[in-house]
Amino acid sequence: MKKLKKSLLALLTAAVMLSVMFAPKTAVKTDAADATTQSLQDQLNSLSTQIKEYEKQISDLSDQKASEMEIKANLDALSAVTQQKISTAEALSDQLKSQIETTTAGIAEKEEAIKTTFNKFLERMVVSYEEGDASYLSIILNSSDMADFLTKMDMVSSMLEYDRNLKIQYENERTELQAAKTSLEEAQELQSTVIDDLEADKANYELLSEQQANYIKTLEDDLSKANSAYEQAKAQENALDAELQAYLYQLAIQQQKLEEERRAQEAARAAQGNTEDNTSNTDATNVFVGGGFAWPLPGYSGISSGFGWRTLGGYSDFHRGIDIPAPSGTPIHASKGGQVLRAEFNGSYGNFVLIDHGNGESTLYAHQSMIGCGVGQYVNQGDVIGYVGTTGYSTGNHLHFEVRINGEPNNPLSYVSP
């Protein structure tokens, strides 16, 4: 009977051991590609495609001897997209730097965890080697009764299960470590490529910015081309000015009417002894009345061209604002809080932004390299709404700044000072 019992226990122990040795391995899930990194890569690819398209358009226009202003407009668009690509590449580089730091720290933690798991595994291997199956049989054979026998069988199974899980844990940790190292290598390789491309884009942007600044100057060597370009730009400027004057004038009338209605309602409520505010949503339209204007380019106080009549390219020209020179890409700040009415390109003004401040007041910011806000957006005084450039009819990087009252241009120096 004892011999039969030993044989049965040996078979049971062997069965458990076989289940440990030949148990299926747990699949290790790998993390999906970082969504932010992928999104930035997609944006870079899209911007690179746009840059190639603008370069081809400029080349085709040059071959076709298109109008100089048309070529200049495409140069402006190429400059804006290149600047946007640089900003996106810098964001991706920062994201990759953070990802590399996080992954490196994770690898160190995984290596430490693997070391701990491996040491535990070695300890169990040593115990198994020294005691062998006899230790398990000894535990089971020393059972006092059937209940004790079943309890110790569960205990032996748990010990063997622990060994199996320890082995799986070790294998999983090694797989995860290798995946992390591969991810780190890929991130480092991508970061190196992005940095190289970024430096090339910055060099190209400097050349492009210089090309923009010199393009109109080059035209001046050919008087007929310069005259044609000036007349074309001036016609576009005058058309936009007439449109803005009419639009802003009507807006001022509408705002004045709303203000008068609001005051009438307040007076009526006061007369009735009712202080509850029942103003309608229409009356609650943002008006932004009150507060002064601020200089739009902090740190740059020079004025290269003032408000009023001037001579430009041999022509007598009325300058509707002031020109403030600054390097390309310098942030432009909202002179006063308000709502963005226009954020678009014009042949003369280039990329420009128009902000309504209520009470008939508005400001305009022209020749931007890249617009930093959208139509309908509400901005606070000091918010960045774009970046200095030389788009449109411009011979150098500067901000053309206007202050308009009921649509009419006024001397900005009557409202702001450096």
Image (cartoon, rainbow, N blue to C red):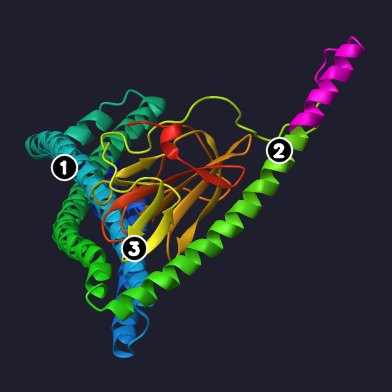
Which mark sits nearer the N-terminus, 3 or 2? 3
Q: Which residue range is magenta in the image?
A: 259-277
Name the amino acid type tagged 3.
Val
Crowding near pointer 3: few (<14 within 10 Å), some, many (20+)?
A: many
Say above or below: 184 vs 337: below
Determine which residue is flagged by label 2.
255
Residue at point 11% right, 39% down? 125
Q: Residue 357: x and y, percent?
A: 57, 37
Say above or below: 117 vs 197: above
Which mark sits nearer the N-terminus, 2 or 1? 1
| 87 or 324, nearer to the observer | 324
Residue at point 63% right, 48% down? 248
Determine which residue is flagged by label 1.
104
Name the amino acid type tagged 1.
Thr
Q: Residue 208: x and y, percent?
A: 22, 66
Image side of residue 300 versus residue 112, left or right = right
Give the farthest residue toward the bottom.
64
Secondary structure of residue under mark 1: helix
Crowding near pointer 2: few (<14 within 10 Å), some, many (20+)?
A: some
Q: Distance between the residues labelled 3 and 1?
A: 34 Å
Q: Distance between the residues labelled 3 and 2?
A: 37 Å
| 408 or 208, nearer to the observer | 408
**Residue 269 magenta-drawn?**
yes
Image side of residue 235 versus residue 75, left or right = right
Q: Does the magenta stretch mainly form a helix, a strand or a loop? A: helix
Determine which residue is flagged by label 3.
81
Q: Is residue 276 visible?
A: yes
Q: Can residue 23 be seen in this view?
A: no
Circle number at residue 191: none
Q: Residue 70: x and y, percent?
A: 39, 76
